[in-house]
Image (cartoon, rainbow, N blue to C red):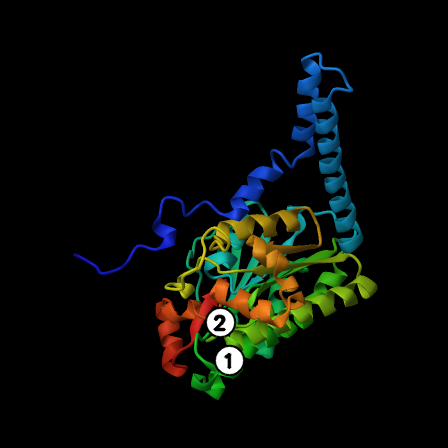
Amino acid sequence: MATNQRPTARDSWFAPLSIDLVLKVLYVTFLHPFVAWMVVLCFRAEHMAWDAMPIRVSIAYASIVSAGWILAAIDRRIAFGPPRNVDLSDEVIVITGGASGLGLLIAEIYGMRGASVAVLDVKELDNSEARGVAFYKCDVTDKAQVIKAAAEIERDLGLPTILINNAAIVNGKRLLDLDFDEIDRTLSTNLASHFYTLKAFIPGIARSELGGTIVTITSVLGELGAIQLSDYAASKAGVSALHRSLTAELKSSHPHIRTVLVTLGQLSTPLFHGVQTPSSFFAPVVEPIDVAKDIISAIDNGRAESIGMPLYARWVGWYHVLPLSLQKLARWASGVDTAMASFVGRRTAADKALAKKRPGVLIEKS
């Protein structure tokens, strides 16, 4: 059957090529200390004198690269402190919005690796046979349900040690087209629920001798805002501010608890079907598996961390340093205010049932 769909940048042969991929290759080759010093040794293996220009240049280059890695390690240690010890057989991981998407991916990986995993969601698991994953039906916007789920998890699995706040929704409407119920729902799910889960689970994490890790997933839109995403952007800005305040509080009251902030650009999820990135090279769409790898790496190594994906998500804070005229130019060049014009989204059966009660609401399992 013929279709009238136009090919997109993501369908082309060069779609996987991005600035993030280029940097990833550079970090394990020319920008890696081992490779840089190997160049020096290769020149020396050719019996080149130590004072020869190629040797001197390569030594200077290797020294600069090594110094960069050392300073980066010192910076992370000062910013985030020492890592905690992690033994997956003793960890109890709680994931909100974990019935599908990124949340379910992380849950399945940890379940297969021997950790105890609890998923909180209003819908059933996409994979009902996920090994090592316990499902707790819970609406995270309901304080009573969250408190009840926390008590059941502690009874069934033990004291929680890792909390991943992943659940979120998006309406995809202009502010004047939103009704009050939709606004309340977005702010409750995307922001207020974080307060509820943190209040419910941190006391248990604090009692655990293992320490703990709290992962917060937010969006670059919390820094930028965008047309048709006013409620979503406002909630994500609140989440980022909450995380930073919580991190400061825990450092003084519970220094054994680590915090991880994950700031994402456009995530490859059916929810954002139809939204086109203006540049697959400079603003590539992020795949859930890549996000999961970085989150799991931070948790496994017991590190506090600030993760930004793709590259521009790590530098988005500098946007506010630009003169206002350049900010306007950057918004035009990035297409942030036109991206939602092609927004389609995709609803599951559960989402359609919810839509009957709240027309226009689309569930995001990040």
Quadrant of image for the N terminus: bottom left
Position of residue 232 measured from the top left corner of the image (x, y, whole percent):
52, 74
Residue in front for this viewpoint, 254 or 321: 321
Residue at 49%, 60% in the rendered image: 266
Per the image, label 2 sits on a secondary structure element best described as: strand
Q: Is residue 359 above or below residue 217?
A: below
Residue in front for this viewpoint, 4 or 61: 61
- What amino acid is at disc 2? Ile
Q: Is residue 366 above or below residue 47?
A: below
Residue in front for this viewpoint, 347 or 56: 56
Residue at the disc numbered 2: 169
Residue at the disc numbered 1: 185
Q: CA distance from mark 1 to mark 2?
A: 8 Å
Location of residue 31 (image quadrant): top right
- What amino acid is at disc 1? Arg
Question: Mark 1 packing: few (<14 Cα in 10 Å), some, or many (20+)?
Answer: many
Q: Is residue 14 above or below residue 47?
A: below
